[in-house]
């Protein structure tokens, strides 16, 4: 079985091919054409520019993925494509390309949720072991997800405002470091002191309430996130008149984002005692986050297996979309159809 996957939800045009060998998914090619250099000049992704670049890139990227995999359209059994969430103009390019190829070559098409892709980026090399808890941290999303089984998602924590990647990107803008913020902040932070500036650790747990008998009842610790206060705190430090070094600001700001992510992840691990904890999404490429979570989870729950994708599979790519398609087919959860459209606000549930 061979699957081609196409991903174009934001600013990367990507295609990948996987083949089933000995009952396991094997990644044959994973091509990503990034538009970072185009959007850098604007300090962020410009939707119209992104859509136009996808149109130019999508066929060459698909061709390259097929060539690298040593295959062609005639040998494909399925096409998987991201149909949301993301930028509508960007999504449409991938969706229509997949449908056109599907019709022309009579290949069944499977619409795929991008967020599932980030989670399933972990299952190209390893069989998932349930129950699991996933921390999904990207430019558009920050959530903790509890999964009892394949494709059964319970969102147990989410951000009330900015996503973690967005916090990195906005922080880099405030510090005038450039775009995208995550990799730049972590690079600059290497030379800084992360304990120099104290940023807030956010706890959204509600206040204790009096019950019917008049006793105070302690609510469950919240697993929700909020990063906008952190951004304001950074602005205040930059404009506050004190002469902080950019390296110290970057290191302390990065530590604050990570502390917030780790705090809620540990709450989830304590509550759900998962067999596996997975970290995923673009921010999962962050070295300090990868290491800190690994250490803290092994201390808190030594029997929980910790999985992270290699860095190339953390930021947007099509291999993760192919992985979802593969596991959907294997578990009888694949819907093949041409009757679907891009859904910019698609959720995971
Ligand atoms: O998953 P992704 O490629 O796209 C979305 O689906 O949003 O994530 C992109 C986000 C950006 O906000 C970027 O700043 C962040 O991931 N990112 C990082 C790192 N590499 C990418 N954040 C922190 N540290 C990194 N090394
Ligand atoms: Zn993504």
Image: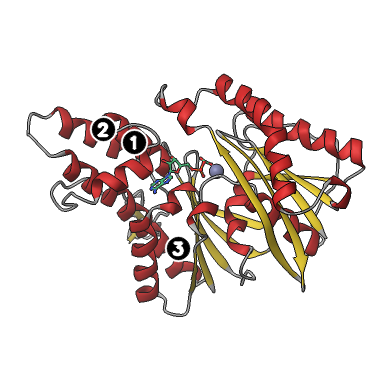
- Per the rendering, the mark at residue 293 is none
Residue at point 34%, 69% (across, down): 296
Left or right: 233 in relation to 41 = left
- Residue extending furthest toward the bottom: 303
Q: Which residue is mark 1?
A: 228
- Residue at 58 percent of width and 56 percent of height: 119
In the picture of the structure, the residue carrying the numbered disc 3 is: 268
Crowd band around label 2 with a 10 angstrom C-alpha radius: few (<14), some (14–19), many (20+): few
Identify the residue shown where x is 33% and y is 63%: 292
Classify mark 1: residues with Cα within 10 Å, few (<14), some (14-19) or many (20+): some
Give the mark nearer the N terminus: 1 vs 3: 1
Q: x, y percentage for residue 15?
A: 67, 44
From the viewer's side, name the closer residue of 42 and 201.
42
Q: Mark number for residue 232? A: 2
Position of residue 186 in the picture relative to residue 149 (left or right): left
Image quarter of the N terminus: bottom right
Q: Earlier in the sequence, mark 2 or mark 3?
A: 2
- Can the viewer see residue 186? yes
Q: Report x, y in % for residue 96.
A: 77, 31
Check whether the beta carbons of the residues at disc 1 and disc 2 lie within 8 A of each other. Answer: yes
């Amino acid at each position: 079985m061979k699957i081609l996957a196409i991903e174009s939800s934001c600013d990367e045009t990507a295609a990948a091919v996987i083949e089933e060998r000995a009952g396991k998914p094997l990644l044959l090619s994973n091509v990503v054409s990034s538009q970072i250099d185009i959007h850098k000049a604007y300090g962020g992704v410009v939707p119209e520019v992104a859509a136009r670049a996808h149109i130019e890139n999508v066929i060459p990227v698909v061709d390259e993925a097929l060539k690298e995999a040593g295959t062609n359209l005639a040998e494909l059994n399925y096409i998987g494509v991201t149909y949301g969430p993301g930028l509508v103009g960007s999504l449409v390019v991938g969706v229509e390309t997949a449908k056109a190829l599907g019709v022309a070559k009579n290949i069944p098409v499977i619409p795929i949720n991008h967020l599932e892709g980030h989670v399933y980026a972990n299952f190209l090399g390893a069989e998932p072991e349930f129950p699991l808890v996933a921390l999904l941290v990207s430019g558009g999303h920050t959530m903790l997800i509890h999964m009892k089984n394949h494709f059964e998602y319970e969102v147990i924590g989410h951000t009330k405002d900015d996503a973690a990647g967005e916090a990195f990107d906005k922080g880099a803008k405030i510090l005038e470091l450039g775009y995208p913020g995550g990799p730049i902040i972590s690079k600059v932070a290497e030379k800084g002191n992360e304990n120099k500036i104290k940023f807030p650790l956010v706890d959204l747990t509600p206040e204790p309430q009096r019950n019917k008998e008049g006793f105070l009842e302690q609510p469950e610790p919240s697993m929700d996130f909020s990063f906008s206060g952190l951004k304001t705190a950074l602005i205040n430090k930059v404009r506050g008149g004190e002469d902080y070094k950019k390296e110290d600001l970057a290191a302390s700001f990065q530590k604050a984002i990570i502390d917030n992510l780790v705090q809620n992840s540990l709450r989830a691990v304590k509550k759900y005692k998962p067999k596996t904890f997975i970290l995923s999404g673009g921010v999962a490429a962050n070295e300090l986050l990868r290491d800190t979570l690994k250490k803290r989870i092994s201390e808190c729950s030594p029997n929980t297996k910790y999985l992270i994708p290699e860095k190339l599979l953390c930021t947007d790519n099509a291999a993760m979309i192919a992985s979802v398609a593969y596991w959907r087919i294997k578990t009888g959860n694949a819907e093949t159809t041409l009757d679907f459209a891009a859904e910019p606000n698609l959720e995971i549930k």
